[in-house]
Image (cartoon, helix red, strand yellow):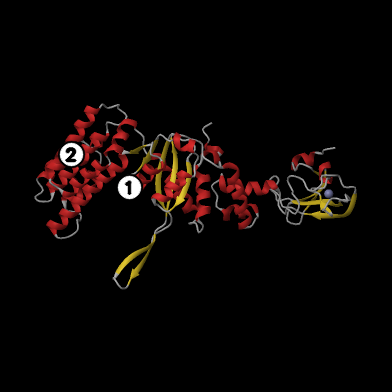
Amino acid sequence: MVNDTTRLLGLDGLAVTRVEDGHDGGPVVYLETADARAQACPVCGVDAVRVKEWITTGPRDLPVAGRTVGLRWRKRRWVCDRADCPRGTFTEQVEQVPARARITTRLRAAAGAAVGDGGRTIVQSARDHGLSWPVTAAAFAAHAARVLPEQPDPVAVLGIDETRRGRPRWQYNTELGVWEMTVDRWHVGFVDIGGGQGLLGQVEGRTAQSVIDWINGRSPDWRAAVGHVAIDMCTVFKAAITSALPHATLVVDHFHVVQLANKVIDEVRCRRTAQVRGRRGRSGDREWDLRNKLTANVENRDRDKTRAMVAELADLGEIGPPILAAWLAKEELRHLLALARTHPDRHQISQRLFRFYSICADGGVPEVQRLATTVQTWWPQIEAFLHTGITNATSEGINRIVKLEARTAYGFRNPTNQRLRTRCATTRRARGCLNPA
Ligand SMILES: [Zn+2]
């Protein structure tokens, strides 16, 4: 006969016999076994008939109605009388309270889900659930194993990007008299772009071999399904993909190309300021005052103000014209990249590319010519972007969550834990609340 209190507590296989007030304000709930299967020997499966002794255990459980509950389960220790069974005695167990467990299955699951799905740290979840750090960490690992797939589903577009793990460490080399970077840790992330799988995996170190190893860890069918791979202009990733996924098309999106062009403007400006003025730029120097306007998109600014800026730079002695050449190259490159998603034909593309190359050549500025060379080197991948419109923005967005997770945890000591936490935070299947279905 199931009573209301048993129904309220909801621990399957256990029945409430009575409830008393505890010392610390929460109730103490007395339980008895209400599952006939608890009588069966866990080794031979035959029901025992002889009771050795009665014992009382107090497993910890989730709060009921906001109050901590003290459980007192009075249960039997049975004797297995089968002659051929190696088990002498056994205690009763139910699914929520396995043998020897000091916490209920549901408390363990809640502590793990708070970290994996609730975005809490191990320390905070441990405090909230009254558990220790190792128990909560193990509960989270069990949660992650449950929600994260062993192998990712096929992806059409794979994104690869790198994230710095922690801060780089520097050491002073007394022999050479220079500072040297001694520790520089990176994670390379693999992202499902366009699909809903989020972060598929991470590997430590940013070498071509580490990328190749991860890709070779997937099935041949999975590798064959990858049609495009989005990367930033990184030769390591290019070499790795050419080797591991030779059939896939590499794509470099406009973001990193424009970022590079803006960096060129800054480099030219700093170099000319140093050469002409003999010092660094500062407020009051016109090229310094214009620095943010130079890197802004031309269509976001007033047409007359842009015209005035161009006239001013052309007139700014020895400093202005090289900066203007870099700015013109940047805008011409953006004009070319704007063809993406417009289904451009080859003629349109080659026309704008030719204009960009001639502007770079005409300016006679070494940094700008280097930009043209870089674009030339990466042209097949940039052209693939113009035709497909595929960007690595998803990877960049996931990088933001990766860093947020590291900050929330005040850094990680264990990179394996970090990868597990990061994957739980960035994989939609692991986070029910973000599942679009
Ligand atoms: Zn037995």
The earlier-in-sequence mark between 2 and 1 is: 1
Q: Find numbered disc 1 in the image and state the secondary structure of the residue it sits on.
A: helix
| Badge 2: residue crowd in 10 Å (few <14, some 14–19, many ≥20) | many
| Badge 1: residue crowd in 10 Å (few <14, some 14–19, many ≥20) | few
x and y, in percent, of residue 258 in the image = 27, 42
Work out which quarter of the rendered image holds the C terminus and state it.
top right
Q: Residue at x 15, y 44 (%)?
A: 325
State the mark number for residue 423.
none
Q: Nearer the viewer, mark 2 or mark 1?
A: 1
Q: Residue at x 31, y 30 (%)?
A: 387
Work out which quarter of the rendered image holds the N terminus and state it.
top right
Q: Residue at x 76, y 54 (%)?
A: 58
x and y, in percent, of residue 374 in the image = 24, 44
Q: Is residue 113 visible?
A: no
What's the amino acid at mark 1?
Answer: Thr
Q: Which residue bears the numbered disc 2?
A: 357
Cβ of mark 1 under 8 Å from ligand 1: the answer is no
Q: How much space separates mark 2 and mark 1, taking CA atoms? A: 22 Å
State the mark number for residue 235.
1
Cβ of mark 2 under 8 Å from ligand 1: the answer is no
Instruction: Pick the residue in front: 253 or 204.
Output: 204
Q: Find numbered disc 2 in the image and state the secondary structure of the residue it sits on.
A: helix
Q: Is residue 204 visible?
A: yes
x and y, in percent, of residue 232 in the image = 34, 44
